[in-house]
Amino acid sequence: MSGEILYSVRDLVVEYDTRTGPLRAVDGVSLDIRRGEILGLVGESGCGKSTLGKAMMRLLPRNARIAKGELLFDGQDLMSLSEEQMRHVRGGKIGMVFQDPMTSLNPVQRIIDHITETIKTHKPDASDDEARERAEFLVERLGIRKDRLDDYPHQLSGGMRQRVMIALALALNCDLVIADEPTTSLDVIVEAKFLDLLRDLRDEFNLTILMITHNIGVVAEVADRVAVMYAGEMAEVGDVHPVFAEPAHPYTEGLLKSVPNIALDEEELYQMKGGPPNLLHPPAGCRFNPRCPYVMDICVSQDPPMFPVHGGGGVAACWLRDPERKRSESD
Amino acid sequence: MTDATPLVEVVDLVKHFPVRGGLLSSLLRREQVVARAVDGVSFQIRRGRVFGLVGESGSGKSTTARLILRLIEPTAGKVLFDGVDMGTLSPNELRRLRSRMQIVFQDPMASLNPRMTIGDAIEHPARIHLPDLTPRQRRERVIEMLEAVQLTPGRQYYDKYPHQISGGQRQRVVIARALVTNPDLIVADEPVAMADVSVRALLLELMMDLKDRFDLTYLFITHDLATAKYVCDDAAIMYLGQVVERGPLREVFRDPTHPYTRALLGAVPVPDPRHRRTEPMPAGEIPSALFPPSGCRFHPRCPIAAAEVCPVLDPELRPVEGLPEHVAACHLRTGDYQHLDPERSG
């Protein structure tokens, strides 16, 4: 895998207008996505992961806006593009897969029409036959019989509909697929098969996938790297193996310990105390400090920057990882 | 009844939902098409235990639960609650029995009336099932229940509306409402599926504490085997309206015998990147309950199916070697055709 950065989010701030004032759902987040990787973006409800995904496509709801920050995709500053240009990037270079494919598919349009229309919008010179041929190739590659192309979305199962969404992204030779909870509505066996497929497609089509999910197991299963969000901020980013083996942020640690694990013999689940803060009035310093078992004086007053962890392979926003602190301790 | 009587006994339970056919089929007087949602399910829930009903969408687990609560009438078979056949009860007797069984659904927002205060919502079943209480006693009982689910002080939550509290707290309210009539059985239908992981652990812990404190028995319905592992004593794995494997949960997990149980266990994503799944998943998807496959319903997807047996004969639940309580319905694993099992050792 090359280390080339395909998408770089820099210091992103996204605000929602609420009756009680602006709410920062994403507050100063930076994230690099490398070409050809599957990056898992995890966190609990309200942590800002979906807002981040939508902002990366500039698809925010009307009451939200990007207040600050840069979105650099394949060397291009997406913030400088017109809405018209942005439409070409969406669908053309960045594909999207959402939790409920029914809301993304037109119920009165056959599957074949979805795919050929997509192909022809972005490649106007493609003939009907070429478009159909490409559509047939893609759905068969995704494990759907090609006669199902003439079905309407409601005639397909949930797993098949998610495959169609992937087919739409592949139809365009997208570089990046942003998948927001793509397996949440699927049964476990269907989910497992979908994850296998994503892994194969990544290798075959050199896809880059940002997988936004609350399911830690899914990330462990397919991701190369993982980014953990908490209360609108990035808590930790790194390769899955070190992050899961030795989480550098106490929130990551708590999150991983509270996930039910079928492979372990333990009888009780770890319970993290408290709940996420109200983002209208986030706590001072580190936002995790009221729940953190290792809280120190500095944590309640100063917001931690990202410190390098795992030998430079990852970063974590935690004062425990401050190299200065380690030095003063060893003195 | 003695303690040896199971709290719930389900015997050959069947529920077929008629499906409205088109004009043509009614003109041709074809046979009525039915969805075989539940098709011959039997099990017992022992007092004080947590019984897990596990399966994917369309396996019939929620329909089975609704049959047990008699929210719908079975097509055939019976449910004994505390030794009493519920099918023989008059509407009045049934209503009295209902106060002893309560249900908790997945989505607490859909279970609570947004315009009713939390206190009123919990008080409502008490009014129906505990008519002897004075209004003051009822209010005290509600506050006691709020505090039992750790919404303390209960008084502070009484007049709040559902939208004023968090999702995890709302599910606690639903549990408190289920407890107010002092039930024996709680049917929990995916009670934590919508909760975030950190909230999920707290809710499960609470449910287990309440079980001991109020002598409850749970029927825990879930698609999530990883969660089932932490709460269930016994489990039945359902596939297309039938139980394919049943037994003490530890045994089922230690020695999954039916190929479907194995696939289901293998599919659960493990939160550890060192444990990535390598075994292949069953082909295709769950067939329609309108036209279930002949013989063993799993045979078209089964990696070990034997062509001469599995599509032809219906398998029965039979004991897994040496463990009378652990049963599985597979010709090749527990039935008469074990010599055909390609994975058979020795």
Image: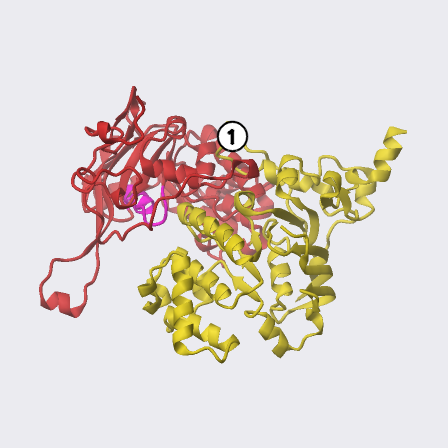
Chain colours: A yellow, B red
Q: Is residue B99 above or below residue B107?
A: above
Query: Quadrant of the rendered structure where residue B189 is?
Result: top left
Residue A158: image x %, image y %?
40, 57
Q: Is residue B151 above or below residue B3?
A: below
Pick the front one: B62 or A91: A91
Query: Quadrant of the rendered structure where residue B126 is?
Result: top left
> Chain ID for label 1?
A
Pick the front one: A3 or B91: A3
Q: Which residues are magenta?
A: B55-70
- The tally of labels here is 1
Residue pointed to by mark 1: A264
Query: Quadrant of the rendered structure where residue B6 is?
Result: top left
Q: Is residue A181 visible?
A: no
Callout 1: few (<14), some (14-19), or many (20+) C-alpha neighbours within 10 Å? few
Q: Is residue B269 above or below residue A115?
A: above
Q: Residue furthest right?
A: A331
Residue at 29% of width from left, 19% of height from top? B322
Instruction: Name the residue type under label 1.
Output: Leu
Residue B270: image x %, image y %?
51, 38
Residue at 48% of width from left, 80% of height from top? A125
| Quadrant where the C terminus of chain A is found in the figure | top right
Looking at the image, residue B200 sits to the left or right of residue B75; the answer is right
Residue B299: image x %, image y %?
25, 42
Residue B118: image x %, image y %?
51, 50
Residue B330 magenta: no
Element at badge 1? loop
Looking at the image, residue B64 sits to the left or right of residue A321; the answer is left
